[in-house]
Image (cartoon, helix red, strand yellow):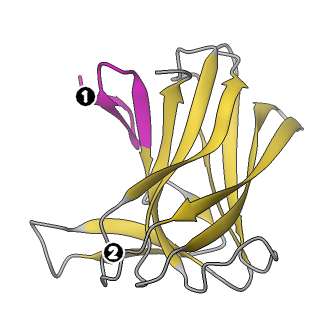
Amino acid sequence: SPIERVGFERASSTPAEVFIGAATLHGSTTVQSNWSTYPTRAHAFHQLNDSATSTVGAMVGKSIPWTSVDIYAVLGNPSAGTGDVRWTLYYGKDAGTATTRSSVSTTTTLAAGGATYPTPQRVKVGNAIAWDTAGDWSLVLSRLGSDGADTLATAIFLQGLVIRQAGT
């Protein structure tokens, strides 16, 4: 079955990855959608702010079979300019009321999109993260729009997160 779990879709069988769409992510922004171009380009997205912190996240559960993963953001840049985006990814195992999260910060460069609904780009926000396949996990991704390293002066459209077997 192509559906691993509600909200999780295996993007391909080789290499191994799982896509978490914007409609499944929760956070400081509201899910928006563009059905006006259906069926050619309809999608849902979170608009991540360029002047403040915007955060989205998801509970992942035990559906990820790999012990080392890379995490990617799938997003679009609606502006005609390029720029850097500053991210912090929080990840960890949730056990009852005890939550242990680690974090990694990175800066990625986005190419110009220049369209109202730009072609998605995939940027790596977590590299070779050790993943415990026996536990429930959560992922939280923040765009740090007010950080000096974030030079892209526009909101971006986050369409989802990809969890991919590390190194593939």
Residue shown at 46%/21% (left/top)?
168
What SS does tag 1 mark? Answer: loop
Seen in the picture, residue 116 relative to 75 is either above or below; the reply is: below
Q: Which residue is more in the foreground, 136 or 140?
A: 140
Check disc 2: other Cα within 10 Å, few if <14, some if 14-19, many if 20+.
some
Location of residue 6 (image quadrant)? top left
Specify whether residue 55 is painted magenta. Answer: no
Q: Which residue is mark 2?
A: 33
Q: Which residue is more in the foreground, 118 or 31?
A: 118
Seen in the picture, residue 73 relative to 109 is either above or below; the reply is: above
**Image side of residue 29 versus residue 89, left or right:** left
Residue shown at 82%/77% (left/top)?
148
Amino acid tagged 2: Ser
Q: Find the magenta span and give its range.
A: 1-19
Q: Can you see residue 61?
A: no
Q: Can you see residue 135?
A: yes
Question: Residue 56: image x %, image y %?
Answer: 63, 60
For residue 157, the mark is none
Question: Residue 150: image x %, image y %?
Answer: 71, 73
Amino acid tagged 1: Pro
Residue shown at 49%/29% (left/top)?
164
Seen in the picture, residue 138 relative to 89 is either above or below; the reply is: above
Q: How many numbered discs sit on the rendered protein? A: 2
Question: Residue 115: image x %, image y %?
Answer: 30, 82
Question: Residue 1: image x %, image y %?
Answer: 23, 22
Specify whether residue 14 is painted magenta. Answer: yes
Seen in the picture, residue 63 relative to 98 is either above or below; the reply is: above
Pointer 2 or 1: first along the chain: 1
Q: Which residue is mark 1?
A: 2
